[in-house]
Image (cartoon, helix red, strand yellow):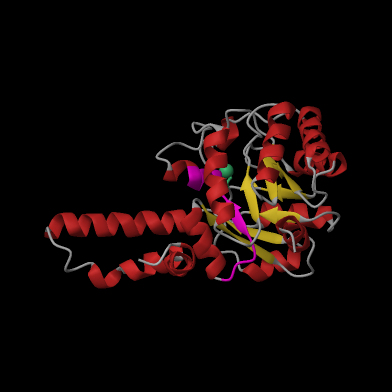
Amino acid sequence: MKKTTKLKNLLNSQQLEFLMEAHNGLSAKIVEEAGFKGIWASGLSISASMGLRDNNEASWTQVVDILEFMSDATTIPILVDGDTGYGNFNNARRLVKKLEQIGIAGVCIEDKLFPKTNSFINGTAQPLAPIEEFCGKIKAMKDTQMDDDFIVVARVEAFIAGWGIKEVLARAEAYRQAGADAILIHSKNSDFEQIADFMKEWNRRHPVLIVPTMYYSTPTSEFVKSGVNAVIWANHNLRASITAMQNVSKQIQKDGSLHQVENSIANVNEIFRLQNAKELQIAEMKYLPLT
Ligand code: SPV
Ligand code: MG
């Protein structure tokens, strides 16, 4: 089955589904091996792993280069965090064209202005895109895709920017009517209340994704009850790797020796396994002249 169809099915399935964050080829492969059915290519995580801020400091083609490695390394679908689409409708539709070429299953765009800032940094100071302009962007993206199953998710940032449920509902409905395949409702609150209120009004009229980074203690059963379709665990591989790398770097620096860390980290053979080094050895026997 095509990756696009897999993602489409996932967003329209009868049970709650999960996308796990990855930010490069290796982390994408690890997410697939862990059993996830889909990957969230997080803008925050990709920018951070480049040593940059989540403010469109990396060019969109630099991000596409990373996404291509992620796509090549995996068989499960990738939903890309496309930020604002890197400009107006024209930039966003060109993004869709390139994402389809590299085997990406879908892209999420948010209704902020380019260059964006991460939703958890001074969110209320961030202006939202005019509804009509954002709807035009969604339409242009849907008109551009060659594969009917390619997914465009519209992300509503109105709660983040300090607006109430009326604005959130108006935007979500407008984006649905503009052709978005699903709506992502984001919140920076530490509880699920805001989104639960939205879900009640929304009444399952179109698939909804959420990102519970800040309301992490809400039981997953609450999401199911509310009618959410998919949950994005948005940055947890990046955060795990930060802690692991800080610990091992500090320890080795402090000890001036590898002895303490050797048994607590992946061994070199695990790297080779993840790289599928064995396949190359077999191919060499087949294709290189015998010496
Ligand atoms: C990301 O993972 O980059 C996201 C989710 O967009 S958030 O960081 O919560 O805005
Ligand atoms: Mg992002």
Residue 202 visible in the snapshot:
yes
Q: With respect to residue 240, does 224 lie above or below?
A: below
Residue 47: % across, % down? 48, 41
Position of 36 with respect to 96 (left or right) is left
Residue 238: % across, % down? 45, 54
Q: Which of 282 and 38 is in front in this view?
A: 282
Q: Nearer the viewer, residue 23 or 279?
A: 279
Q: Which residue is drawn at 27% across and 59% down?
A: 247
Q: How many tags in the picture?
A: 0
Q: Is 45 within the magenta? A: yes
Position of 275 with respect to 210 (left or right) is left
Q: Which of 105 and 217 is in front in this view?
A: 105
Residue 163 visible in the snapshot:
no
Q: Find the magenta span and give its range.
A: 35-46
**Toward which corner of the image does residue 152 lie, by quadrant?**
top right
Residue 159: % across, % down? 67, 42
Q: Is 209 within the magenta? A: no
The quadrant of the rendering that contains the N terminus is bottom right
Ligand 2 sits in which quadrant? top right
**Toward which corner of the image does residue 274 lie, by quadrant?**
bottom left
Position of 175 with respect to 242 (left or right) is right
**Toward which corner of the image does residue 51 lie, by quadrant?**
top left
The quadrant of the rendering that contains the C terminus is bottom left
Q: Which residue is drawn at 56% across and 34% down?
A: 61
Position of 233 with respect to 179 (left or right) is left
Residue 63: % across, % down? 54, 39
Q: With respect to residue 179, does 90 lie above or below?
A: above
Q: Which residue is drawn at 80% across and 52% down?
A: 149
